[in-house]
């Protein structure tokens, strides 16, 4: 079985800070990490590899620095890593990104594509389903479990707000995976050694099956009109008081607001 | 493509087990504003099996027309079946704008449609508005949080149609129901290509305990790391009970297994805007604030006077919730008995 796993290098948004004076994003010192849902997807691929044998190829689109993340994927147990890196991809929204990835997938052999549900820097959850549509593949999103059945089909648990849908899919498909369902393994020492002997292949746009006009900014239907720091509302009063006084303050306000 | 051919604001009216979801009515409320600003109509798409008689509810909540696709293939949500039907409706009817709920259904369907129709989609919008562009033409602007809620970005979709967005449940406000409001119901018969149906529903497992949806609650008593454990949440539950509210949680207490994911507030949980949000022992990471700062009235109790939660609280108390919450519960009980 050949599995493609889509991964993205993202800033760790849980440690991003806002400059209190300028109200802008402080990016210095923010570590770059493998997007958590994508890492969960890689873990699922590696579990399928452990159980049934598989060839796992990790792919990513991004700047040359993403090399580090792809080596981490190799050290976890991936067999091959390809980085799509070209100025022609710059400024891509989710549609242009998924289109570029589809061009790469088309020139690779695959039975299954796994992506993370969403990336923590954009939180759109769009690239997976858009990629599936470009390739004409069935999709299952919000995947919490997947196993291979004897008939060769995959049985997949999709986690919804109100419970779980158990789905069976025939043939090639694309899954988007929840990090919470697949605790990722650590890199092994031998894996780390091997990862630095393996090559991270860096591919430009002319190696993949795409029309150039549909890449990057030109191929992106959405444009950023403006971005701005979030307007914080004026903070209310903060009281350092005894518990008894605190209760009085709260009860009074609840009365004013007609809550009690 | 001529943009002038595209008209009207469409809403995907999500149903589960034949019940139209609250987010559909919230989207209709916003669609009404947008359509009025454009001088266009609000059209709801209602897909399912045996659901036609519910179209009137959508009309009474703001739809001018309801397109009903009633077919056994559409009974349960499945990506391909729904993509074919919604794709065909949009291709035939050419809306200028399409709104979806940012649920596990909407976030599965909408990007599939965007990719099929080669148009733009903006996820998890918190603000949707029509403003004049530089030529004075009305422009659809979609604002959403980015970088984990650290920044806001306003997105436009200038050259392709329809312009599409998803919006989380609880973000937009539904309009007052107008009983007897008139509208058109149009039946649509999708032309299914069953050869593409590769995913079968084996079974549905409902979550064991039906936790009431926190995004519908009027009062939320929410706890974070400072609550410590299940016993701590029992104190919050007692307070929620006397107030007639529900208990919610920060991400930290979901990740450590104390509370279920269904009650998580924030970027990776739910967006809530109750009348009263009581944040107990929650420091207020930006991802949490993004999910609750639109609440009408926010009370925060935290030991750390520098906790960021105080920056959004209307009333902040620096103190020990384990002392204050039980005393407050007893006091409110006495007040209500008066």
Image: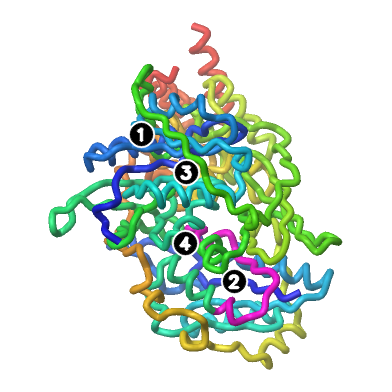
Residue B234 spot, x, y in % from top left:
65, 30
- Mark 3 lies on residue: B101
Q: Residue at coordinates 60% horizontally, 66% vertically from top-left?
A: A115
> How many neighbours does mark 2 have within 10 angstroms: few (below 14), some (14-19), or many (20 or more)?
many
Q: Secondary structure at mark 1?
A: helix
Tell me which segment is drawn in magenta: A104-126
Vertical placement of residue B105 versus A113, above or below: above
Separation of residues labelled 4 and 3 (CA atoms): 18 Å
Disc 4 sits on a residue from what chain? B
Along the viewing direction, whichever of B65 and B37 lies nearer the viewer: B65
Residue drawn 59% across the image and 83% down it: A82
Q: Residue furthest toward the bottom?
A: A197
Q: Which mark is residue B115?
A: 4
Residue depicted at 58% across the width and 72% down the height: A7
> Can you identify the residue that label 2 sits on?
A6
Please identify the quarter of the rendering in which residue B157 is found.
bottom left
- Asked if residue A113 is among those painted magenta in the image, a careful observer would answer yes
């Amino acid at each position: 079985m050949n599995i493609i796993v889509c991964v993205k290098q993202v800033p760790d948004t849980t440690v991003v800070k806002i400059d209190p004076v300028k109200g802008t994003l402080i990016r210095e010192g923010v570590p770059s990490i493998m997007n958590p849902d994508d890492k969960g997807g890689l873990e699922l691929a590696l579990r399928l590899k452990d159980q049934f044998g598989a060839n796992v190829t990790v792919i990513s689109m991004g700047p040359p620095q993403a090399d580090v993340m792809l080596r981490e994927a190799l050290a976890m147990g991936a067999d091959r890593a390809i980085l799509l890196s070209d100025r022609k991809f710059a400024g891509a929204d989710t549609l242009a990104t998924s289109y570029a990835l589809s061009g790469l997938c088309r020139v690779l052999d695959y039975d299954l594509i796994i992506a993370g549900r969403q990336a923590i820097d954009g939180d759109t959850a769009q690239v997976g389903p858009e990629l599936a549509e470009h390739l004409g593949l069935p999709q299952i999103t919000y995947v919490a479990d997947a196993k291979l059945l004897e008939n060769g089909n995959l049985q997949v648990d999709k986690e919804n707000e109100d419970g779980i849908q158990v789905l069976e899919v025939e043939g090639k498909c694309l899954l988007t995976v929840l990090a919470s369902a697949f605790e990722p393994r650590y890199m092994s020492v031998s894996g780390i050694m091997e990862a630095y002997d393996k090559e991270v292949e860096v591919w430009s746009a002319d190696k993949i099956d795409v029309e150039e006009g549909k890449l990057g900014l030109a191929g992106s239907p959405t444009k950023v009109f403006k971005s701005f720091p979030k307007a914080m509302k004026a903070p209310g009063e903060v009281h350092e008081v005894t518990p008894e006084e605190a209760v009085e303050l709260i009860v009074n306000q609840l009365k004013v607001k007609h809550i009690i | 493509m001529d943009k002038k051919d595209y008209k009207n604001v469409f809403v995907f009216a999500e149903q589960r087990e034949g019940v139209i979801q609250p987010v559909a009515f919230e989207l209709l409320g916003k669609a009404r504003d947008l359509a009025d600003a454009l001088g266009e109509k609000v059209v709801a798409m209602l897909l399912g099996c045996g659901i036609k008689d519910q179209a009137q509810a959508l009309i009474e909540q703001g739809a001018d027309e309801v397109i009903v696709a009633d077919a056994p293939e559409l009974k349960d949500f499945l990506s391909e079946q729904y993509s074919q039907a919604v794709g065909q409706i949009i291709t035939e009817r050419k809306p200028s704008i399409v709104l979806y709920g940012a649920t596990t259904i909407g976030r599965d369907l909408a990007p599939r449609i965007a990719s099929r129709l080669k148009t733009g989609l903006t996820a998890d919008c918190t603000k949707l508005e029509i403003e004049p562009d530089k030529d004075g033409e009305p422009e659809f602007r979609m604002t959403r949080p980015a970088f984990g809620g650290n920044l806001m970005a306003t997105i436009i979709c200038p050259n392709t149609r329809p312009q599409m967005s998803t919006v989380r449940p609880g973000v937009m406000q539904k309009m007052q129901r107008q009983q007897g409001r008139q509208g058109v119901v149009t039946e649509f018969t999708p032309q299914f290509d069953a050869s593409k149906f590769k995913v079968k529903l084996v079974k549905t497992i409902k979550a064991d305990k039906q936790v009431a949806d926190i995004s519908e609650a009027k009062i939320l008593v929410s706890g974070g790391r400072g609550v410590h454990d299940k016993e701590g949440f029992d104190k919050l539950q007692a307070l929620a009970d006397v107030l007639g509210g529900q208990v919610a949680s920060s991400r930290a207490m979901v990740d450590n297994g104390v509370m279920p994911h269904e009650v998580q507030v924030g970027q990776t949980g739910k967006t809530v805007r109750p009348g009263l949000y009581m944040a107990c022992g929650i420091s207020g990471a930006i991802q949490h604030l993004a999910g609750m700062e639109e609440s009408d009235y926010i009370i925060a109790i935290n030991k750390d006077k520098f906790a960021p939660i105080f920056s959004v609280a209307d009333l902040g108390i620096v103190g020990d919730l384990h002392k204050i919450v039980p005393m407050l519960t007893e006091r409110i009980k006495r007040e209500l008995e008066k």
